[in-house]
Image (spheres, grey):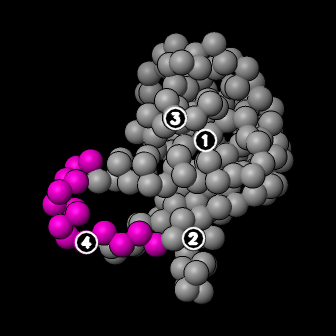
Amino acid sequence: MRLAYINFLIEDENYRAGVLLTDETTKPVEFRITTNLNIDQLQEILYGESLKEVLYKERFTVQLLNALQEEYDIVLVKDRSLFSIRKEIEKPVVHIQKYEYFMPLNRLSHKVVNLQERYEPLYITISPQDEKKLVSISHQLNDMYRNFNIMEPFDRIEKAIKYLSEKGQ
């Protein structure tokens, strides 16, 4: 299974995003990053509260996924608002987060656990159009989570964005 992780970094007025495509061992297969997108005050005013969602969806996420040369099976996101990209791509979008005891489970969600308790439990939610794939995706992620921290690649993207920003790239 190949996973496309999407993450963002916002520093001051600079917005950047990256997609890291990994195999089932979280080994990198491909990496793409956006250039700095500087948002001026007028754009912030005009976009208002929709600024981040519009930028993430329109400017970053879909473009990054379309730029990938290699195939991927699912997209993992930490920002729930990115479910909306499912309409524009042909792959399942999975929201992943740390599990909290009082989180309500629903028909679109599953708990993912590391049986060795090396990593904390996770909670995945899938977009409604992929409901039939939830059990399969959950089992595959559980299998991966036995040996690999499937949340850690999000940190790699952020570190890579910072590194490339410091290098002026």
Nearer the observer, disc 4 or disc 1?
4
N-term-proximal mark, 2 vs 1: 1
In the depicted structure, whether residue 41 falls above or below residue 18:
below
**Residue to which mark 2 is pinned:** 161
Q: Quadrant of residue 59?
A: bottom left
Residue 124 located left or right of residue 103: right
**Amino acid at the residue labelled 2:** Ile
Nearer the observer, disc 1 or disc 3?
3
**What is the secondary structure assignment of the residue under circle 1?**
strand
Residue 39 x %, y %: 31, 69
Circles 1, 3 touching at the beta carbon (< 8 Å): no
N-term-proximal mark, 2 vs 3: 3
**Residue to which mark 3 is pinned:** 88
Q: For the stretch drawn in magenta, what is the main secondary structure?
A: helix
User: What is the C-alpha distance between the residues marked 3 and 4?
Assistant: 27 Å
**Residue to which mark 1 is pinned:** 76
Residue 102 x %, y %: 43, 27
Q: Which residues are magenta?
A: 36-50
N-term-proximal mark, 3 vs 4: 4
**Amino acid at the residue labelled 3:** Glu
User: What is the C-alpha distance between the residues marked 1 and 3?
Assistant: 15 Å
In the depicted structure, whether residue 80 falls above or below residue 6:
above
Circle 2 packing at 10 Å, graded few (<14), some (14-19), many (20+), is many
**Residue to which mark 4 is pinned:** 40
User: What is the C-alpha distance between the residues marked 4 and 1?
Assistant: 29 Å
